[in-house]
Amino acid sequence: MFDLSGKCVVVTGGGRGIGRGITRAMARAGAAVVVAGRSAGPLAEAADEARRLGASALDVPTDITDPEQVAALVSRAGAAFGAIDCWVNNAGSARPGDVGALIDLDEAQWDAVVDLNLKWTFFAAQAAARAMPRGGSIINISSRSGSQPNPMTGQYGAAKAGLDNLTATMAVEWGHLGIRVNGVAPGVVEIESSTSMTKSSRRRRQLETIPLRRLGTVDDVGPLCVYLASDEAAWVTGEVIQIHGGSRIPVGYLTYLHHVNERLGWDDPAPDNAAPDNAAPDDPAPDR
């Protein structure tokens, strides 16, 4: 089951973090993998790892905010492996400088996050769909933040909520083409290059919201993507599948929200007008 032999899979943002885990999982399942992203070094390392796992692999430095580069990625994938069978939209996130309360958010912070996680993710999916003459699978990596409050990076949660809606709409519009479109929404995943979980207090608070009592790893997400890329998922489309160790269960998350409210001063019935210290290193960051 879940054999991807003979299939070509493109993974954007595939050189690091969750994308690297997805690339690894696709390679283990036998897919030919095309790894795309902005940093050439990590892409080359991911492609080398895929080859060591026995897969064919191609690394293509690509900025998904540049339509010409996305078109070149589609062309190179097709030339190397034939038609694209699966496209994983993993590229996206929010920078530390984009973290802050909505009351203080400026236009540049909004545009940087929403454009990357919604606008350009859609146009990458559109390019992929146009390159799937025999049908295929598009997988949008969303976030738990798209379906619940996301204090301190509200624009990221809004973008992911929009992506979830687009996922369903694309599934409806492209189903007659044999194209399935699904989303995967991870919770808090620990990434080696991230410093957001270095404080023991932040790690403890996050663990308190997760019934399985551990953070996610980059290798927790890849197997679900393999399933969605496989023929076994042939009747699955328009879904956004949560993967978060149970952390969406309300009781635990309300505990976390209570802490955020305290930091923002919202528990004070008559707070002053001073802006919160948004630069504090212990502030919450996006799930991805």
Image (spheres, rainbow, N blue to C red):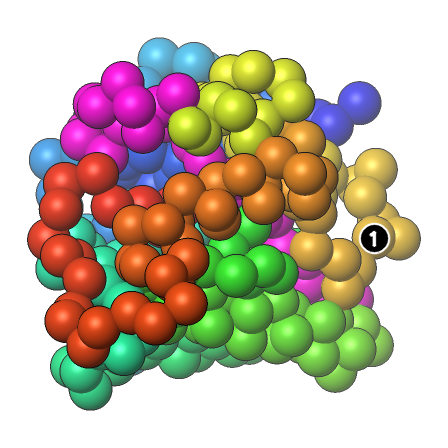
Which residue occupies 20% across, 86% down?
Answer: 107
Q: Which image quadrant: the N terminus?
A: top right
The image quadrant of residue 177 is: bottom right
Q: Is residue 31 above or below residue 133?
A: above
Q: Is 179 inside the magenta-drawn segment?
A: yes
Q: Is residue 141 left or right of residue 266?
A: right
- Identify the residue under disc 1: 236
> Would residue 125 be seen by someone viewing this image from the given angle?
no
Which residue is more in the foreground, 244 or 240? Answer: 244
Q: Residue 181: image x %, image y %?
A: 68, 62
Q: Residue 135: image x %, image y %?
A: 71, 63
Q: Is residue 95 left or right of residue 34?
A: left
Q: Is residue 141 above or below residue 193?
A: below
Q: Is residue 242 left or right of residue 86?
A: right
The image quadrant of residue 117 is: bottom left
Q: Is 233 inside the magenta-drawn segment?
A: no
Q: How many marks on residues?
A: 1
Which residue is more in the foreground, 267 or 99? Answer: 267
Q: Residue 154: image x %, image y %?
A: 39, 68
Q: Is residue 264 above or below residue 210?
A: below
> Would residue 160 be seen by someone viewing this image from the given angle?
yes
The magenta stretch is: 178-204
